[in-house]
Amino acid sequence: MKAERLLSILTILMSGKRISAAKLAKDLEVSVRTVYRDVEALSLAGFPVYATTGRDGGFGLIEGFRMTGQIFATGEIQKIISALDGLSGICPASEVEALRRKFALLLEESNTRGVSCPENRIYI
C-alpha cells in the first residue's frame, strides 16, 4: 500500500506542477501527516523533491528530473510491451504504438546498463 502511494505521489509530482500536502492527502485519501512522511521517504530515496511555502506553495520535483527505466527490470519492460498488444482494440493504434516506442526506449536503456543490471549478468 505504501509503495503504491509513493509511486502515486511520484507520478503526480512528475507532472511538473507543485501540489500542496492537503491536495495530495485528499487525492490519496490519507492524512496530511502521511503525505509529509511519504514525501520525506521519496527524498531519502534520492528523488529530488522540494517544498515551497506560501499561498502557492507545495511539493514538486526539481526541474529537469527524468525518471529512467532503472526502476524496471528488463523482463518487466518486455512484459509491459507485450501487454500493450492487448490494448489494440480498446485504444487508438497510434497511442498504443507511442507507448510501445517509449517502453522500447527504456528496454534499450536497460540493456546498455550492462553489469549494473543483474538480469544482464552472465555467470560462468
Image (tube, rainbow, N blue to C red):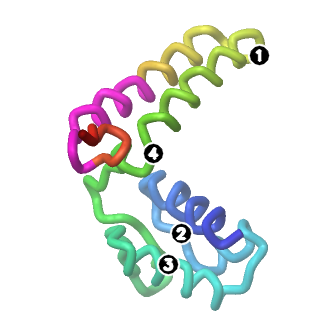
Is label 3 or label 2 in front? 3
Q: Which residue is mark 1?
A: 90
First-in-chain label (3 vs 4) = 3
First-in-chain label (1 vs 2) = 2
* Amino acid on which disc 1 is placed: Ile
Tell me the tag on residue 110.
Answer: none
Q: Residues within 10 Å of mark 4 (few under 14, many from 20)?
A: some
* Amino acid on which disc 3 is placed: Val
When the figure is inspected, residue 7 is found, relative to residue 23, above or below; the finding is above
Q: Nearer the viewer, residue 114 or 93?
A: 114
Q: Which residue is mark 3?
A: 39
The reply to whether the C-beta atoms of the residues labelled 3 and 2 are less than 8 Å apart is: no
Q: Residues within 10 Å of mark 1 (few under 14, many from 20)?
A: few
Q: Which residue is mark 4?
A: 72
Q: Which residue is mark 2?
A: 19
First-in-chain label (1 vs 3) = 3
Magenta region, residue range: 102-116
46 left or right of 73? left
